[in-house]
Image: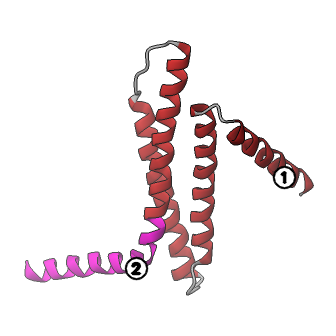
Amino acid sequence: MGALYRYCSGIASSIVALFAPLTPLVWSVVGFILFDFLTGVWASLAEQRREGKRWALESRLAWHTIEKMGFATTTLAMTFVIEIVILQSPTYEMTRLLAGFICGVELWSFVENACRISSSPLLRHIRKIVSKEFNRRINDE
């Protein structure tokens, strides 16, 4: 029994050690996703109040956020394994790029939620400029 315990403990320690460099990236992505969820709830509440409707938090929204965190973390881990184990790249730039992309999408979602919460013309102007620039770059390629 002691040998089996040491064997399983060794496997678990190896897996933790393999993914240890991912910790800051995973926490960053999870933080962005949670912040997007909170601002999304706030935006929904603000819109419902403006319209004079009753507001309720739907559990499917919370589950969607949990699923998104799970898929994002799994995607980062899989990209990391491809990069470190298969491609043997010591810098894991592809994984960082993916984490940056996920955080960028969540940041854009935050800007959209901020526009829904606030009637600030500055936020709407920033959103319009970024959308126009994004569409221009997509159409150029």
In percent of width and height, residue 51 lies at: 55, 14
- The color scheme shown is secondary structure
Residue 111 vertical placement versus 100 (above, below): above
Residue 8 vertical placement versus 59 (above, below): below
The residue at 41%/75% (across/down) is 19
Query: Which residue is outermost to the top?
Result: 52
Three-letter code for the amino acid on which mark 1 is drawn: Ile
**Magenta range:** 1-26
Residue position marked by numbered label 2 in the rendering: 18
What secondary structure is the stretch in magenta mostly built from? helix
Label 2: which secondary element? helix
**Residue 17 horizontal side relative to residue 30, left or right:** left
User: Which is nearer the eye, 141 or 50?
Assistant: 50
Residue 82 vertical placement versus 130 (above, below): below
User: Which is nearer the eye, 133 or 5?
Assistant: 133
**Residue 38 horizontal side relative to residue 88, left or right:** left
Residue position marked by numbered label 1 in the rendering: 138
Circle 2 Cα neighbour tier, 10 Å, few/some/many (<14 / 14–19 / ≥20): some
| Badge number at residue 114 | none
The residue at 89%/57% (across/down) is 141
- Quarter of the picture holding the N terminus: bottom left
